[in-house]
Image (cartoon, rainbow, N blue to C red):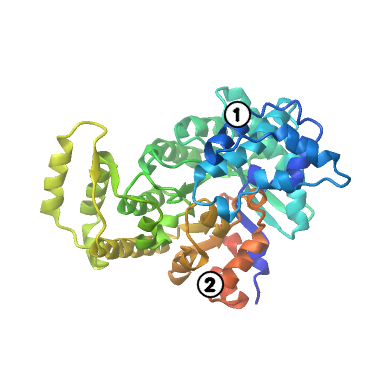
Amino acid sequence: MDTDLQKGCELHVHVGGCLYVDDIFAMGRDIYEEVDWSLFVESYEKAYGVRPDPVRIFADAITTRRPDLCDLRRHYVFDQKDGGDFGRFMAKFNLLICLNRHWLETERDGELVERIVERHRSEGLDYVEYRAMYMSHGDEEVVSFHRRIARTLRNASGGGLTARYAVSVPRWDPLGGLELVLRLLDESPELADTIVGIDFCNVEEGFPPKTALPLFERLERHNSEHPERSLEVLYHVGESFWDKSLESAVRWCHEAAELGVRRLGHATALGLDPAVAISRREDAHVAELDSERLDQIHYDLRHQVELRKFGVEIAPGVLEAEREELLGRGPGSQVTRDYSPTRLEEIRRRQDFVLHRLAESGTVVESCPTSNLRIGGVPDAARHPIHRFLRSQVNLVVGADDPGIFDSPLAAEIDWVVAHSGLDARGLAQRLGDPRRFRLGQQRPR
């Protein structure tokens, strides 16, 4: 037994992030002088302290006898040296966004999706669930964008590869985003087989899982009324959680799963050792809003019996007194608490508790090794959260996330796990099993 099954099924990948540096060059070589590069230039300067000149970068690449993409690669590929800073990632990703905006004006984005699917087919993938977000104030533009992507994926399926689509909705308006997806399905029922889910991605800070509850309530009604085109939810959580305590970051993962999420993206907060997490920045995770602490108190009181079974001490009287004090404070106030060895050990037990609950519920964790190292602030391979996931009983899949901008396809991600986990290919294949059993849409009537 080897890892061919795992290397052939991609369950966590974003359409834009699938474009490699040669794709970026092909997109821009004929239009680079017409593109509005301001978003890329300004964000890159803010993140790196250097003001890039994308027109010169493309011109220099073109004028060489054989296109020299080294400088373009340096400004686009997100390497380990860039890591631990989402702002830096977005600065480089904005190069693609600027190009893509120009392509969208002519509605040629379908050509890019075809190019992506063909690359995946050539890599030997046979099943891929793609995700994409389109941010616009115009509902018509949003619906039109997702319709084009879904149609392209539908038409590109075949030849040994099945392509499916999960629409990424904005965290600041999830219900509004869902309504547009449902409208799309009403208007284009032929896409129901392709559009199988909803995805929450992008910045998670400031958007606790409870803010998505209206979406889940609406989705439950839709799925009951239209089982033939029911949708499931993918949810990035516990990936970037600098705005809160480690207890709250762990809680967010559990709360997202309790909403009925099919798969959790990254969930780094459940696998990264707490001592490592707080060492990544000065005063990391020491402060959080009173509202987060109040939610944590409510959570601890609600789960106190189960938490005690995992060695987490809960003192209801103390928590209730703290809650009364916090309720009397003004909006925007913060709680500050330092980390002791005892507290860090308790957080490890909280992680064990949530991983146990996820295993019981069948919730799947999607771990993306390179992405977590470069975006998630995981310091090195030895302390990657995937090791803890592998030791647990949680359902687990490995994804590439943004293979183009990381220059790391799915096969390389699987090989990375084999190289660093202590498992050989056979052992990893046995632990993970066939990831296709976690694909979306299986609950639909045949």
Q: Is residue 201 above or below residue 263?
A: above
Instruction: Indicate the position of residue 297 as horizontal and vertical percent values.
Output: 22, 48
- Which of the two labelled residues, at mark 2 and mark 1, occupies the earlier sequence position? 1
Residue 156 in view here: no
Instruction: Indicate the position of residue 113 as horizontal and vertical percent values.
Output: 72, 42
Considering depth in this image, is 426 or 157 the residue closer to the camera? 426
In this view, the residue farthest toward the right is: 65
Instruction: Indicate the position of residue 325 as horizontal and vertical percent values.
Output: 13, 40
Instruction: Indicate the position of residue 48 as horizontal and vertical percent values.
Output: 55, 41
Mark 2 and mark 1: Cα distance apart in space:
41 Å
Horizontal relation, residue 89 to residue 122: left or right = left
The residue beneath circle 2 is 421
What is the quadrant of residue 88 in the picture? top right
What is the quadrant of residue 434 in the picture? bottom right
Amino acid tagged 2: Ser
Mark 2: secondary structure: helix
What is the quadrant of residue 349 in the picture? bottom left
Horizontal relation, residue 383 to residue 184: left or right = left
The residue beneath circle 1 is 142
Disc 1: CA contacts within 10 A as few (<14), some (14-19) or many (>=20): some
Amino acid tagged 1: Val
Which mark is on residue 408? none
Horizontal relation, residue 286 to residue 408: left or right = left
Q: Look at discs 2 and 1 and give the one toward the viewer.
A: 2
What residue is rendered at 59% in x and 62% in y?
A: 435
